[in-house]
Amino acid sequence: MIKKVLIANRGEIAIRVMRTCREMGITSVAVYSDADRKSMHVRYADEAYHIGPSPSNESYLHIDKIIDAAKKSKADAIHPGYGFLSENAEFSEQCKKEGIIFIGPSAFSISTMGDKITARRTILNAGVPVVPGTTDPIKSNDNAIEVIKEIGLPVMIKATAGGGGKGMRLVQNEKDILPSLRAAKSEAKAAFGNDIVYIEKYISSPHHIEFQILADRHSNVIHLFERECSVQRRHQKVIEETPSPIMNPAIRKEMGKHAVAVARAAKYEGAGTIEFIVDDNLNYYFLEMNTRLQVEHPITECVVGIDLVKEQINIANDKKLTYTQDELSQNGHAIECRIYAEDPDNNFMPSPGLIQHITEPLGFGVRHDGYIYEGYEIPLYYDPLISKLIVWGKTRQETIERMKRALYAYKITGIKTTIKFLERIMNTPDFVNGNYNTHFIEKNKKFLEEEYKNDGNGKAMAIIAAFIDYNNRIEQAQQKIPPSQKINNWKSSGRKKSMLRL
């Protein structure tokens, strides 16, 4: 049985895994780079080991250093989280060779589903609908032109080793074929060390819907229903929700069966996600499989009531699933907002820096998965995701209103964040009505920009006032002023409640 787990990751996902380990009585081991020496995941873990310089290729992506830390700590298993080495077949295989349990799928499953062309072939053989396209790599410019003429524009050029929107180009005109091909291959080479691409038909009004699956080592496979992930910016997810506003029971059941078929075809073990593209008429096509835990997994946990990390660990312990498909149901509605250290009003430029103040949202139905704290400096080296705000409600409408309240209460000073941008989305009619697809942000760009302009100076003044109050309280604490003599800065300011919403 697993008694000690090394988490080969950082930030909020490392802490999230550690929380479940603590519930299960399992010792957690953190690894950290130079930049993460003071990170919260290092503080939260039972043990922590330094693995190298700040750049991820010298620390979190360095397999030998991770394995060495696992040996030094005498960890029974490694949980990869998501990102970094989580979908690295070599890492999974190396763990196996060293006698360390990899809390995830086999190297075979990762390789099969990690290469998009191999995945397409596998899924076609399993009888699952796939977007029309190539099942072989594009070999030359002439080959690309010939394939596109056969499929018909528009098409997507995609990196076979791709993910996260990298190595991907939409082609709508013939003149853009070769420039887009060059750009996709170049970006794929830089991101994945592999410039092989393939081509598939572009669905003009796509919905991005994914199914969560669990598979044990005893041939039991179940799905935990769908997540709607169509609010995206540059092919990166921004907001996710479950259930999907466009789904109906018949399509949900049909797609769920195909998701299970994909997992079986890949001989999968653990938690994974089957992603589909769905058009306005609810025609659906397999897109890809993520052989790891997803960023948005908490919303599934909220509506299904199952701890997915606990299930991962149980599966790694060779236990059978304790649920059957017929026993599972969706209870209520959940939405996740990803909070990034980015400036939405400056083309979403990263905004690393010192966290001066943070007020986390609280209350019924609110979950906050984060890793920052006051005085922590967000490093330059990693993904700017700093937290995830998850809310649950009995209905979609209630969940949206609860998310508005939670975002309103969420205050971070010292850096720019996407909190206000997410607030604007929650007020966008298309989102409120559930009438959106992956073009949502582009389609509503004007509304989102106008919503920001209409915020006025009140909110900015509120943030400034909060920061002044925060500094005053620090000064009073340093001067050791008795509580009875402390000044209430809010009352003395004489401000009107309508001006400062804090």
Image (cartoon, rainbow, N blue to C red):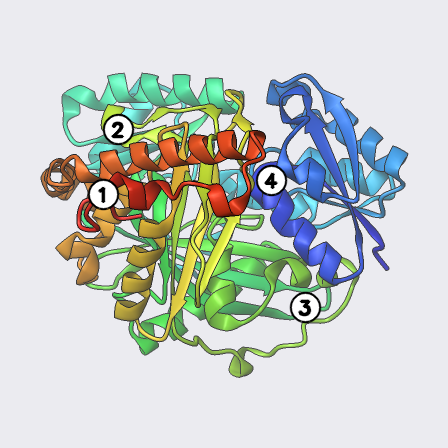
**Residue highlighted by disc 2:** 146
Q: Is residue 232 above or below residue 65?
A: below
SS label for mark 4:
loop
**Res 219 label:** 3
For the point 26% across and 18% down, which residue is it? 178
**Marks 2 and 3, the one that precedes in the sequence:** 2
SS label for mark 2:
helix
**Residue highlighted by disc 1:** 494
Q: State the residue in front, 162 or 5.
A: 5
SS label for mark 3:
loop
**Marks 2 and 1, the one that precedes in the sequence:** 2
Amino acid type shown at disc 4: Glu
Amino acid type shown at disc 2: Glu
Q: Are discs 2 and 4 less than 8 Å apart at CB?
A: no
Mark 2 vs mark 1: give the one in front.
1
**Marks 1 and 3, the one that precedes in the sequence:** 3
| Alpha carbon separation for disc pair 2 and 3 | 42 Å
Amino acid type shown at disc 1: Gly
